[in-house]
Image: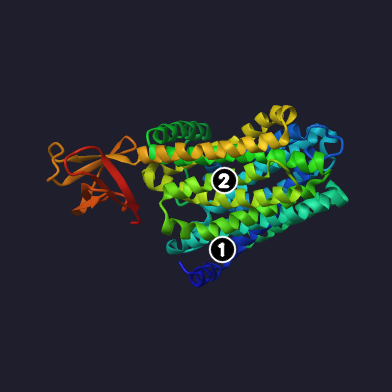
């Protein structure tokens, strides 16, 4: 899609008044999130009274990430039952009040951690609700654009909040920044109240809440089993999780270097976020160009190369500018990996399982950062920083041949025919991720690749997607060559 087309579509969805109010909700709440994130990092990691930066990072990540990971999967149970407009209007006000529990920092440990956990847990309900109501505010053909506008604008605003909040915490302490956060969340409520559309679900759920929570837990188990039986989705999801684990170690190391070697404050964290955020934006802008020229396997492998090589290069003499450059490149590579992995997962998982699988995906990648911080504590204490950075770079690069082989193996597919598997018959079904799906043949042909004569089919699946498969004309396993848009 052209840039002009993207801007025109964004302008079209913003012409809907209620959607503009929802974007205002997203902008205000996520700007406040960025400010509050700076407060948490300033109190737990960069406080002058803290002696262990790595332990502080582990605590901070637990506060910032665990609520998202644990509350997220069950949030929908309550969002489908409670008045959604009320959630959007009241939750920000409650968050603004609870934020003041953190005003004294970790000097008042119980109020600080309780306030931070409640504020961030409530945020998951707010953002999930904001996403759930978008179909009520724009026509169905504009959903993709509306989701993009809402998500990207909110994410950018959170980056701005962190960038502004870090220096403010360094200069003025927690109090003024928390007050600014509360103001942002009051404005969030104002925008929510201005939404006129009926945001209620078309059909309210029946049954007890406990039954629905138990159902969610069972369905997460179903999603995990489906994922384990779908290598074409498991491989990219595992790659993102591994990437986030290694990025988590680099993140801890970066904060340790800024705090203990350069004696910087939470403003240094803002610098890391800005550098990484710019990298993500550049990655988002370039990933489609890469996918036009290279296979997805190659793009995923390239993302790990672009992550690992810079770490090895700077490990010998780390300075604050090296860290910012590396943060930019890690953000760039992550965008390449994440967009490609999400697309591969969406294509590989049947539609009725996607929500559950993506919930597992979300939990895995978020919790990997917490695990990384816990593992980084003894590593940072007992290893040289340069050696640790080089080691992480090597672990990025070691993944390259592994994932290339894994993705190549996962491209195999079983094609079934009406009676046996004779090559001159029409395929009736394929087995994808352990599930047999009926297919319709669009075309068949023979071609030669690398001196090998192949039999090829283009098949359409029940969900509208299309695939091309091939195997040697004289027999052998079928291979998934490419997945086409519906």
Image check: 40 left or right of 128? right
Q: Is residue 71 above or below residue 449?
A: above
> Tag 2: Cα neighbours inside 10 Å, few (<14), some, or many (≥20)?
some
Q: How many marks?
A: 2
- Identify the residue under disc 2: 82
Q: Position of residue 2 (x, y in %)?
A: 47, 69
Q: Secondary structure at mark 1?
A: helix
Q: Secondary structure at mark 2?
A: loop
Task: For marks 2 and 1, give the CA distance.
Answer: 20 Å
Q: Nearer the viewer, residue 247 or 27?
A: 247
Q: Is residue 458 above or below residue 118?
A: below
Q: Position of residue 246 (x, y in %)?
A: 60, 38
Q: Position of residue 167 (x, y in %)?
A: 81, 53
Would residue 345 be seen by someone viewing this image from the given angle?
yes
At horizontal 32% and vertical 52% (from top left) the residue drawn is: 465
At horizontal 69% and vertical 29% (from top left) the residue drawn is: 379
Quadrant showing the N terminus: bottom left
Q: Nearer the viewer, residue 30 or 310?
A: 310
Image check: 471 left or right of 265? left
- Looking at marks 2 and 1 on the same chain, the residue that comes earlier in the sequence is marked by 1
- Identify the residue under disc 1: 19
Which of labels 2 and 1 is toward the front? 1
Query: Toward which corner of the image does residue 260 lie, by quadrant?
Result: top right
> Tag 1: Cα neighbours inside 10 Å, few (<14), some, or many (≥20)?
many
Would residue 185 be seen by someone viewing this image from the given angle?
no
Q: Position of residue 14 (x, y in %)?
A: 56, 68
Quadrant showing the C terminus: bottom left
């Amino acid at each position: 899609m052209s840039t002009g087309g993207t801007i025109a579509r964004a302008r079209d969805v913003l012409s809907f008044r209620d959607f503009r109010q929802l974007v205002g909700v997203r902008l205000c709440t996520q700007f406040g999130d960025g400010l509050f994130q700076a407060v948490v990092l300033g109190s737990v990691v960069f406080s002058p009274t803290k002696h262990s930066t790595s332990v502080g990072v582990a605590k901070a990540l637990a506060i910032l990430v665990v609520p998202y990971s644990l509350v997220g999967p069950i949030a929908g149970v309550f969002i489908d039952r409670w008045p959604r407009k009320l959630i959007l209007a009241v939750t920000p006000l409650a968050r603004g009040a609870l934020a003041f529990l953190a005003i004294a920092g970790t000097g008042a440990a119980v109020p600080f951690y309780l306030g931070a956990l409640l504020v961030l847990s409530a945020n998951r309900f707010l953002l999930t609700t904001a996403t759930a109501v978008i179909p009520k505010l724009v026509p169905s053909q504009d959903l993709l654009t509306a989701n993009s506008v809402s998500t990207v604008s909110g994410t950018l605003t959170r980056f701005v909040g962190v960038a502004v909040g870090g220096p403010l915490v360094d200069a003025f302490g927690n109090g003024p920044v928390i007050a600014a956060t509360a103001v942002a969340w009051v404005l969030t409520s104002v925008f929510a109240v201005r939404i006129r559309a009926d945001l209620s679900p078309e059909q309210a759920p029946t049954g007890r809440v406990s039954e629905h929570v138990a159902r969610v837990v069972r369905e997460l188990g179903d999603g995990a089993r489906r994922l384990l039986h779908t290598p074409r989705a498991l491989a990219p999801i595992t790659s993102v999780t591994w990437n986030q684990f290694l990025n988590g170690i680099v993140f801890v190391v970066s904060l340790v270097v800024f705090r203990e070697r350069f004696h910087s404050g939470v403003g240094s964290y803002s610098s890391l976020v800005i550098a990484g955020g710019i990298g993500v934006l550049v990655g988002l802008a370039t990933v489609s160009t890469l996918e036009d020229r290279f296979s997805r396997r190659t793009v995923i492998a390239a993302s790990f190369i672009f992550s690992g090589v810079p770490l090895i290069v700077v490990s010998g003499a780390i300075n604050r500018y090296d860290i910012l450059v590396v943060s930019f490149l890690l953000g760039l590579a992550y965008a390449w990996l994440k967009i490609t992995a999400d697309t591969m997962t969406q294509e590989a998982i049947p539609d009725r399982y996607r929500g559950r699988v993506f919930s597992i995906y979300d939990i895995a990648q978020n919790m990997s950062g917490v695990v990384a911080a816990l593992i980084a504590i003894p590593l940072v204490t007992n290893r040289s920083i340069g050696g640790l950075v080089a080691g992480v770079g090597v672990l990025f690069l070691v993944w390259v041949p592994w994932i290339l082989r894994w993705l190549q193996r996962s491209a195999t597919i079983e094609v079934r025919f009406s009676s046996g598997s004779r090559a001159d018959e029409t395929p009736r079904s394929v087995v994808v991720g352990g599930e047999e799906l009926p297919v319709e043949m669009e075309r068949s042909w023979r071609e030669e690749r690398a001196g090998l004569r192949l039999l090829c089919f283009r098949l359409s699946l029940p969900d509208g997607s299309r695939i091309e498969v091939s195997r040697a004309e004289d027999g052998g396993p079928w291979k998934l060559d490419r997945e086409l848009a519906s």
